[in-house]
Amino acid sequence: GNSVTQMEGPVTLSEEAFLTINCTYTATGYPSLFWYVQYPGEGLQLLLKATKADDKGSNKGFEATYRKETTSFHLEKGSVQVSDSAVYFCALSDQGAQKLVFGQGTRLTINP
Amino acid sequence: DTAVSQTPKYLVTQMGNDKSIKCEQNLGHDTMYWYKQDSKKFLKIMFSYNNKELIINETVPNRFSPKSPDKAHLNLHINSLELGDSAVYFCASSQEVGGRASEQFFGPGTRLTVL
């Protein structure tokens, strides 16, 4: 079956540090991949997505590249800000599936 | 313009009571979902409706009953509330594209506390 595995949190960084949150997936077909962000007290928002191998999704300084050979979609940002503190979810949507499969979420805290 | 809205935002109630949460989307999407998020932020899908038809029902106690009066609304009714039902419930919607679920748009959540 389809599954998504994210790196264990919580992750704590200082402002301006480099961020990587790892995400690997298992899928039977060729999935679309997503990163969602959940700020405190809010619902999930789509951060970025990629629909085919080697696509790079980017938004708000975050990037993730769809790597079919390593079944990965790692989230990166070159210089994090305090306002990036949130929970990040990796997710996939497979062909023929009528739902997204979410990872367990990674809590990120950025200290000033 | 709120895309996916839920009411109420907070719900505090006693064990054994029956309560409902309402969800509406104005995006014209054909699929709507209910998720439960526990205190560790783990997100679990509960139900999905496509054009008012139930398509996903994930091992949820039958005390939970979704109802979709039209494709813009998906309500969740919970009977005989238990302490373990305390969580944040999220509604979401999406439009199927190319035979798969596309990106989902989430509501702000309803924090349910059962005392």
Image (cartoon, rainbow, N blue to C red):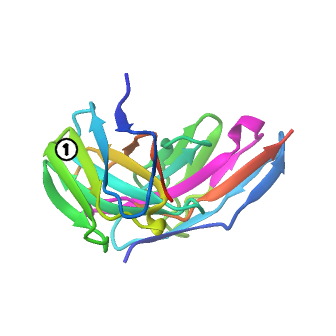
Range covered by the magenta-colored residues: A75-100
Give the image quarter of residue A94.
bottom left
Residue shown at 69% from the left, 40% from the top: A84
Q: Secondary structure at mark 1?
A: loop
Q: Position of residue B90 (x, y in %)?
A: 41, 49
* Amino acid type, label 1: Asp
Q: Position of residue A65 (x, y in %)?
A: 56, 53
- Compared across the picture, whether B6 is left or right of B113 comes to left
Q: Nearer the viewer, residue B107 or A35?
A: B107
- Compared across the picture, whether B51 is left or right of A74 comes to left
- Compared across the picture, whether B111 is left or right of B19 comes to right
Q: Outermost residue, top direction? A: B1
Give the image quarter of residue A74.
bottom right
Q: Nearer the viewer, residue B94 or B75?
A: B75
Q: Nearer the viewer, residue A9 or B115?
A: B115
Give the image quarter of residue B29.
top left
Residue A73 lies in the magenta-colored region: no
- Measured along the vertical axis of the image, is residue A4 above or below residue B24? below
Residue shown at 75% from the left, 42% from the top: A78
**Residue linked to disc 1:** B30
- Compared across the picture, whether A75 is left or right of B27 comes to right
- Measured along the vertical axis of the image, is residue A62 above or below residue A53? above
**Is any atom of residue A1 visible in this view?**
yes
What crowding class fits label 1: few (fewer than 14 Cα within 10 Å), some (14-19), or many (20 or more)?
some
Residue shown at 76% from the left, 40% from the top: A80
